[in-house]
Image: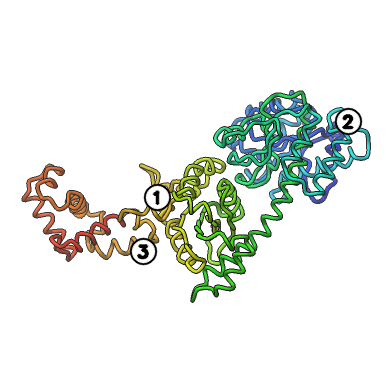
Amino acid sequence: MHVEDLLRLESLDLTLLWGDRPQLTREISGVTATDLEDPGRFLQRGELVLSGLVWWSPADDEAKAERFVAALEEAGAVALLAGEETHGGVPAVLVEACRRHGIAILSVPVHTSFRAVTDTVYLRQWGDLSRRPAAPYALPENVRAELSRLLADGTDPDTLLTRAVAHLGTPPAYVLSATGRTVARTPTAPLLPVRRAAEAVTAATTLSVDPDASPYAQWHLHLPEPVETPPRMLHEIAEVLAQHRRATLRHEATARGRAADLLALIDTPSSPAAPAALGRALEACGLADQDPYTVITVKGQADDDGTSDALTEALRHLTDCGFAVGRLPTAEPGEATAVIGTGEAAAEGGDTIATTLKNLWPTLQSRNAKVPLHGGISTPATTPGTLKGALKQARYALTAARSRRAPGTEAPTSNLTAIEDLTTLGALLRGIPADVRTAFGIHALGPLADDTNPSHRMLLETLDVFLTHNGSWARTAEALHLHVNTVHYRIQRVEMLTGRDLARLDHKLDLKAALLCR
């Protein structure tokens, strides 16, 4: 396949920004997607380079674009395909740099995914290879034929991976998920701990199987030991695995539809769902005999598919639990919910689900660090009829998780909260919607809610310290470096402005809650 062939494909809708006949007739040997400022060491001669241009900003000088394109020329890249989404177009300085170095440059519109380009190149090459003798850097014809047959038969990923690398001397090889879950491994590959596998996913030598999938749903081909294998051959193996991956994603989409039906029944506004209908929905999701159940709700990016991918990937680490991930009819954008059948895992005792997911959460969050990922977990629902209550618990815990802030900032911090974590008044109040908390605080504190008044701020500080020290006049005075009489005077002012009697426990609790709601 040549560079000019891509321009003829209406489905890709690419635009030639610069390139003459010598550049456009170059043969493409493979594709690499990168946003490194200096990608040269990861490129192979003859490759097409895809870049979203995240490495460049309008404030950068021409030298930065010059260094990037010079690295492409030195590595022998045939062309640069630059995405328009990041900057709304392709910078002119980059086009000029490509002109100087003799690298064809094409723009990729927002509606064309990098995966579409990658698939086009490798599927075209795959078809070409099946009709002619194997090129020096391609899988042998007999291997391609065998892998095609295995894909058609729906072979498991372990067998597919093992057969794909068999002609390389059967080196240790893995297919790893975004969070380090081992999807497949060859017989020569030892078990890889999740933590080490998660690190391997980000290694420069690991090849993404499906780079255009969401950050949480990607698979990665990992060969821990160096092998004398042409990059084109590894890309073809990755493409075989990508075809298997896309088949599994189609099954997941169907399963999510069944899960959405189940969640709609659970979230029936007026009354509980009929037991028979709920039983049929659980059975369709493979959860009919897996009670007790736990419900988890997760909120992430606006694209709910990405959040569903994140939740699905997290739950696959619960090896002994079935689950159904879907979207509630009343869900916010970017919200996904799952019903987990804890079954025998619950009978063993302990908080296996919450502990496993909390340990995994930082790794899951790191796969899309710019978007905080929050989650709420219910207590177990002992019967299908109590799933509605478990759903309410999960959503309440999610609200509490989203209200948490990183220390010293106003930014929300990624957090997974179980309903059992809400053991203090402050934690409990975090699950109440922010506008409700604000309204309660204003009503309970009265004029003191206006903390722009310096006198009110002073009284609020005194009230907070007084309640923190269990109403002790002496300890409050000591903490604030005041005379006891001054503390008495200030508390009297608080009582007068709020209409509360701080000798009463219920009034103390009201004002403590109001302070926590500020």
The CA distance from mark 1 to mark 2 is: 57 Å
Residue, disc 1: 404
Calculate the distance from the C-alpha at mark 3 to the C-alpha at mark 1: 16 Å
Comparing 447 with 226, the one in front is: 226
Estimate how packed mark 3 is, as few (under 14), some (14 to 19) or many (20 or more) residues with alpha carbons within 10 Å.
few
**SS for tag 2?**
loop
Q: Locate residue 342, reporting x and y percent.
A: 52, 55
Q: Position of residue 219 (x, y in %)?
A: 66, 41
| Residue 91 shows up from this direction | no
Q: Is residue 308 at all visible to an observer of this figure?
A: yes
For residue 110, which numbered disc appears in the image?
none
Q: Secondary structure at mark 3?
A: helix
Q: For the point 40% across and 61% down, which residue is it?
A: 433
| Nearer the observer, 5 or 176 | 176
Q: Amino acid at mark 1?
A: Arg
Nearer-N-terminus badge (3/1): 1
Q: Find disc 3 in the rendering and name its residue.
A: 436
| Residue occupied by mark 2 | 135
Position of residue 163 measured from the top left corner of the image (x, y, whole percent): 79, 36
Q: Quadrant of the N terminus?
A: top right
Q: Amino acid at mark 2?
A: Ala
Amino acid type, callout 3? Val
